[in-house]
């Protein structure tokens, strides 16, 4: 299960007993004041409706902002001729102009990589200097935080690799060839950067071997 889903599940588990105690408290208040039983149902429903509406708005706004971001849009208009162009393409197929938006995305990804490394360093220092005793709960929370950060780091790395390679199959083969033969990287590391399986990378290497 993804860390985000785990956090959502934890939130629901916290909200259920909170809802129970809220209704229990209201029932006691209404029994003393002689209020209508309809309020016992109406007030919690209104409160939870407002909470879920706010959460829904936040989620929708987050999705919209994310899709408008340069790193999450797949298609663009060429700045020179206005033709539709893929973010990973190095040149416009219509006019041959260089895709400068691709460089902008690469710069943002490199900036995100630096920020992730800073977070990892600060997190490590904080844990080493912490005087609080470790418990099972804190260790579990740390595991969730680390997993979320790792997934974010992997997502950035895959996007960056795809932008460096470009959209052509030849570019991918050349990149894999350089990584495996020149830099002596493992198939597992190459597969992680590509977001592909080791079997897929092995097939590409077999194809490269035939061309050599």
Image (cartoon, rainbow, N blue to C red):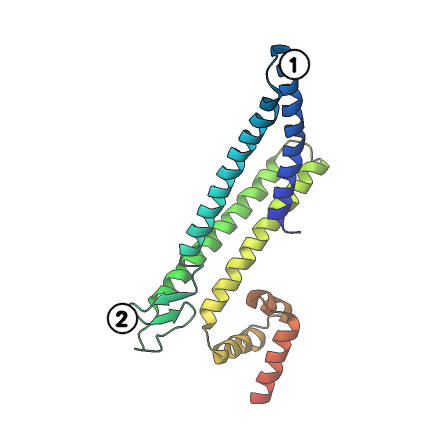
Task: Find residue 160 and report its horizontal and vertical position in percent.
Answer: 48, 63
Q: Position of residue 90 (x, y in %)?
A: 39, 73
Q: Earlier in the sequence, mark 2 or mark 1?
A: 1
Mark count:
2
Q: Nearer the viewer, residue 92 or 113?
A: 92
Would residue 146 be visible to someone looking at this image? no
Instruction: Name the one closer to the observer, 133 or 53.
Output: 53
Residue at horizontal 34 percent and vertical 75 percent from the top? 92
Disc on res. 31: 1
Quadrant in which the C terminus appears: bottom right
Q: Secondary structure beneath disc 2?
A: loop
Name the secondary structure under disc 1: helix
In this view, 115 is above or below 167: above
57 vs 96, left or right, is right
Kindly tell me whether residue 150 is visible in this rendering.
Answer: yes
- Give percent across and percent down for residue 200: 62, 75
Q: Which mark is residue 80?
A: 2
Circle 2/circle 1 CB separation < 8 Å: no
Neighbourhood count class around disc 2 (C-alpha, 10 Å): few under 14, some 14–19, many 20 upward: few
Label 2 vs label 1: CA separation?
A: 73 Å
**Which image quarter: residue 48?**
top right
Outermost residue toward the right in this view: 136
Q: Nearer the viewer, mark 2 or mark 1?
A: 1
Q: Residue at x 49, y 45 (%)?
A: 59
């Amino acid at each position: 299960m993804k860390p985000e889903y785990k956090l959502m599940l934890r939130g629901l588990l916290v909200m259920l007993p909170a809802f129970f105690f809220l209704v229990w408290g209201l029932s006691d208040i209404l029994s003393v004041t002689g209020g209508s039983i309809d309020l016992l149902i109406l007030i919690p429903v209104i409160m939870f409706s407002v909470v879920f509406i706010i959460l829904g708005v936040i989620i929708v706004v987050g999705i919209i902002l994310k899709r408008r971001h340069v790193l999450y849009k797949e298609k663009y208009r060429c700045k020179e001729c206005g033709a539709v162009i893929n973010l990973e393409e190095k040149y416009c197929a219509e006019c041959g102009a260089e895709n400068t938006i691709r460089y902008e995305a690469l710069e943002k990804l490199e900036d995100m990589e630096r920020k992730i490394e800073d977070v990892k360093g600060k997190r490590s220092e904080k844990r080493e200097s912490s005087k609080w005793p470790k418990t099972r709960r804190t260790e579990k929370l740390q595991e969730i935080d680390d997993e979320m950060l790792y997934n974010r780091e992997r997502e950035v790395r895959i996007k960056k690799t795809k932008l460096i390679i470009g959209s052509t199959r030849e570019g991918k083969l050349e990149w894999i060839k350089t990584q495996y033969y020149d830099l002596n990287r493992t198939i597992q590391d190459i597969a992680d950067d590509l977001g592909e399986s080791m079997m897929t990378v092995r097939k590409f290497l077999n194809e490269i071997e035939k061309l050599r």
